[in-house]
Structures are given as C-alpha cells and as structure tokens.
Image: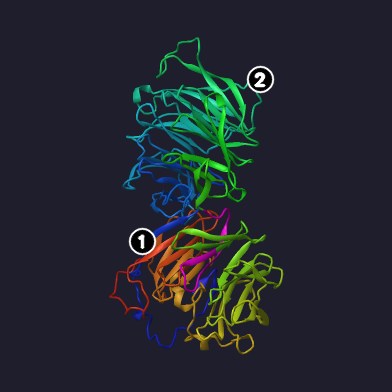
Amino acid sequence: MFLRGRPITMYIPSGIRSLEELPSGPPPETLSLDWVYGYRGRDSRSNLFVLRSGEVVYFIACVVVLYRPGGGPGGPGGGGQRHYRGHTDCVRCLAVHPDGVRVASGQTAGVDKDGKPLQPVVHVWDSETLLKLQEIGLGAFERGVGALAFSVADQGAFLCVVDDSNEHMLSVWDCNRAAKLAEIKSTNDSVLAVGFSPRDSSCIVTSGKSHVHFWNWSGGAGVPGNGTLTRKQGVFGKYKKPKFIPCFVFLPDGDILTGDSEGNILTWGRSLSDSKTPGRGGAKETYGIVAQAHAHEGSIFALCLRRDGTVLSGGGRDRRLVQWGPGLAALQEAEIPEHFGAVRAIAEGPGSELLVGTTKNALLRGDLTQGFSPVIQGHTDELWGLCTHPFQNRFLTCGHDRQLCLWDGEGHALAWSIDLKETGLCADFHPSGAVVAVGLNTGRWLVLDTETREIVSDVTDGNEQLSVVRYSPDGLYLAIGSHDNMIYIYSVSSDGAKSSRFGRCVGHSSFITHLDWSKDGNFIMSNSGDYEILYWDVAGGCKLLRNRYESRDREWATYTCVLGFHVYGVWPDGSDGTDINSLCRSHNERVVAVADDFCKVHLFQYPCARAKAPSLVYGGHGSHVTSVRFTHDDSHLISLGGKDASIFQWRVLGAGGAGPAPATPSRTPSLSPASSLDV
C-alpha cells in the first residue's frame, strides 16, 4: 500500500492462497453505547436539568446523556443511562420544555471528514422515545449555538436561541413549525445566558460579558420573520459594573436575580415605563437594581430557583453552595470538595436532593445537610492513554490533565485516581494485574501497584515523550516506545514490581507509534511515524530482523499496530497516514476496532486484508478518537475522545464470545467506506 507516496510492503502469510478467500463483509458483531463517563462542565453552561421522569439530562461530546441515579441521596451511583445521539458535533447547551419531556439541544459548527463545514443546529427531541421532533435553524446560525430557552407562559410554544457569531444573533422560533419569528444582533460581547420571563413571553433576558439586556418581543401575530425585538440595557448606576454576569433567575414576583463575577447577587425590580407602547404583553416594563447582596468570593456560576421559592447560588472560586430565603437572607450552605472543582450548574432532584455539575467534569448528588458525593466523573483534558485489565472489567486512562484513573466497567464508576504531576500518554497492565506501567511526556515511566497505588518503579529513558508501553504476554519483558526512535526493553520480575534494562531496539528512522509482542514473547513488531514496519528478535539480543518476509507467519499476542497485512484493509482511500490513531484486535481474533481522526469508531472483520474493507461506523465522540481497547472477555470496547475528554464504553453484541474465529461468511455485497453503515 502507499501512504503519502511511500510504498509499504506487507508479506502475505503462507496459509493464505488468495485474498479472495478472506472475509469481505462487515462483521457480524455490532456495538451498542453502554455508558459515557464524564460531563462537560469545564467550559459550558446550560448543561444540567432534571426531567419529569426523574432522569438527569446533561451532555458531553456529541451525546446528550439521560442518567437515572441509583441508591438514595448521597448514596452509591449505580443507576442507568440512555443516550440521545442525533448530533453530528459537540453539544454546547440544553433547554428543557415546560412539559419536562421535550428537550432542545444546540450543537457547535463542525467539519466533515472531507473538511466541509457542518452548520450548527438545534434539535428538539422527545426524552421518552429519544426521537427527534424538529431540527431548528439549520443554516441560520454561525459557529455554534451558545444559549437556548423555551418560553414558559404559553406552554413552551417558542424557543429563543443565541448563536456564537460575532454579533451573537438572538432569534425566536415557533417550536412546532420550526419557523423563525424574529431575529436581531444582540451584542459583540459574549452572551452566557438567555431566558423568557415565566409570566410573559414578550420579555426575554440575556446576560454575559459586562451586560444584562432586557428584550421586548412583539410576535408579529406569529407570522415568520414579522416579529420585532427591542432592547433595553440594564443600568448599573451606583453599583459596580461586573466583568461577567454568567447567570440569572426569574423570581415568582417578577423580579430578576443576577449572579456576577464580583460575587454579588443583584435584584432587578420591575417598574412600568411612562410610554404605554403596546407590545405583546401590553405596557413595556423597565428593570432597575433594587438590592445587592455579596454572596461569594469570586464569580457566581449558577443560580437555581427551588420549588419552595428559595434560591441556590453556586460559587466559582469558593466552591460554596448557598441557599437564600426572602430578602436574600442566607439560610444554609455547603462547600464542594476542592478536587471536584467549582460549581458549574445546579438542578433540583426529588425532595431535598440536589444535583451539582462541576468545572472538573463531575456530577455530584446530595443535599446541603449531608453533603455531596460523585455519581459521574471524568477527565478534564485531552486523553491518550488507555489499557484494559487482563482479567477484570476494569480499565485505566490518562492524559493531559495529569490524572491517572482506574475505572470499574461493571459499576460504571471511578475506582481511584492519582495525580501524575506530568502528562500521561500510554499505559499497560502487567499480565498479573498487580501493577501497571505508565509512560509520560518527559521520557519518564512509572510502575504502580494497582492496589496500594504506590509507585514501585520510576525510570527515565531519553527526554522525549513515550508513545507506547507494552508487557510481553508472559510478563517477563516490558517494551517502551519513545519519540527518540528507540524501543527500550526491560526484563521484569514475576510480580512486575522490579525491572532492569535488557537492551534497546535501534533502527527506526522516526518516532515509535505502536508495537506488539509475539505470542511466544520473543519478538516485537513495531510501527513508526514514517510508516515503517520493523520486526525485532528481543530474546536474541534486541536485533533487527532484516528479512521481514520471515515474519509473515508469526502470531501476535495483541494486534495494535496500525500497519500490517492483517489490518491493511482498515485504511481509507487517499489516507495521509494520520487518519487512524489507534487499532485493537479482539482477544477472540474475530474483529478489529479502529479509532479515526474524524470522531468515529469503526468495527471491521479480522483479518482485514482487503482494500477498502467495509466497516460498521459509530459516532458520538466530538473530537479525534485517540484510543480503542477491548476488555479482557471482549464483552465491551472502550474508546477515548481526544479533546472532548470523554470515555465511551460500548457493549459488543452479536457473534461475540470466546472460541475460534467463525468460518468465512457467505459473500456479502462489498460496501465502500462512503456507504459504511452509520449506526
């Protein structure tokens, strides 16, 4: 095959007489999204609500998650998840209809795999059936959808949308007809929140950088495009003008509370203006500041009106949750533990239960008296390192947030996490499961005891980042692939705790990207940044095998190298060599999973040695997929999103299970990648 004009030679194993006898269709196995780890709290708002069903709705990557907590308040996580997967790029905001069933979700603009722009759009969908009801604003928004709100006074007939263009266009839509009723340029400053007055849909409020705007909307008798929007700026007068007003809430008496970056809650009271210009809601009202209360040290990120009429505020710097009674008298407060980050969003569950989303991508559950415990946790930055446990349904992840996390795939929970102090890029469990090796971006690699989490070994090889660490199948050797073009080999003690340098594999002309051990533990196959496939005799002294033809029948304990005869067919037409980030063969050697640069996970039959082989394609990630790995029993596949910091756990359905690979299936019509099944 050719990549960037370079010929790559792959030798056909002697047992294959003709490529025609290899399987040609997509695999009988399929994937079903089982669980999504993480929550997008780091850089988004309007991202946490409770539906009428009791499910909590939030988003990460391109997926809107409907999560049903298990256990009691503050108790264990448990519960279940459902997923709305209609979006083609990252979801940025949510709004829940007054009926508590319909949901609007807005996505950012993206690009497809050919680099063509995908336009931002709002989906209105049914949370009970997960069916899309309306697609609103395709072609009307720029860059992304920044904020959304349903009207309340008229049973959610209207939807207000603010986009992420320079002018932050504000538009009002008829939800049932998906028709635009009015549109106006709102401001060049960022808009962080939008809402309809619950008493009167002709009053819309927006807030953001250095502003609160009160809008009067006259509906133009419901004729599309005929409505008008007029703006009144909130005047701060003698009160200090804050840099940001991230949140506001309407009180039952019609007043408005705003939370700002100075830590103040301002009360805006209504007064009728002199001019009786009739709008949709009769006489125009103006709002002025009638009270100020200093509530938090640093910014206020969230305000929530409770069913009992009290108000909750959530702090950024001080991580406090405060409950306020009439006249903004503080009633009760609690502090979120530091390692969860600041309060990003607050939603009210049943009884006194609260759900709190944090800036470190965690979802907490509890109340102000008992405190809070995490039910959903996630990473906060780009993810690269992934390995699955040799005999338990557990897996380990690491990335640019410097956290090393062990996840329980059955309990869908974080088992533990530690701070690596450096970026973790790769990891692998010792076959005993007792220790795990982690490669860092500085050339350091650590071995940790998986029970005590103590570092039992700390070694540095070179000063460039490490891209792969891999134990031999018998656990006697550890291979470390570096960006300095070397593979360092260590001999390892039986418990994995001690290691000593055995040798170096020298001969690659670019950085190491992937490597695998042979089943007998004596040989290594490796790939590099300039698309070389090299073979090494480790047991014989880390020698480069010059005659690559002699390795054509060697059996490999794992198959994660992206270049090789058995996976040649996974490469798309016209690839530049960077399209595939990770690849993993199942332990039963029936299927191969691929993580690509276009936010997709693919499933191919194995071996996959026919050009342009068909695959099953799965979306949901909002960024390049950096790694895929099967769990020890092939029951699940784990995939990592890069910049979206998400971890997806997919259930493998169909012809799974241990045992020999099935006979070659009957000939199926060959699908080109363009017509691959998008599930």
Q: Secondary structure at mark 1?
A: helix
Q: Residues within 10 Å of mark 1 (few under 14, many from 20)?
A: few
- Which kind of residue does numbered mark 2 sit on? Lys
x%, y% of residue 249? 50, 30
Mark 1 in CB contact with mark 2 (< 8 angstroms): no
Q: Is residue 185 visible?
A: no
Left or right of residue 663, residue 529 in this image: right
Q: Which segment is the magenta one?
A: 377-396
On screen, residue 422 above or below 156? below
The residue at 40%/67% (across/down) is 603
Left or right of residue 310, residue 530 in this image: right
Indicate whether residue 386 is drawn in magenta: yes
Instruction: Please state which of the two labelled residues, at mark 1 or mark 2, is closer to the viewer.
Output: 2
Residue indicated by mark 2:
238
Q: Residues within 10 Å of mark 2 (few under 14, many from 20)?
A: few
Foreground of the two, 318 or 7: 318
Q: Name the image quarter holding the C terminus.
A: bottom left
x%, y% of residue 651? 39, 63
Q: Which badge, 1 or 2, is on the more N-terminal residue?
A: 2
- Which kind of residue does numbered mark 1 sit on? Ser
x%, y% of residue 191? 54, 34
Q: Secondary structure at mark 2?
A: loop
Please identify the quarter of the rendering in which residue 132 is found: top left
What is the number of the mark on residue 510? Answer: none
Q: Is residue 358 visible?
A: yes
Residue indicated by mark 1:
675
Query: In this figure, which colouring scheme has been used for the structure?
Result: rainbow
On screen, residue 472 above or below 484? below
The residue at 58%/26% (across/down) is 266
Q: How many numbered callouts?
A: 2
x%, y% of residue 552? 48, 85
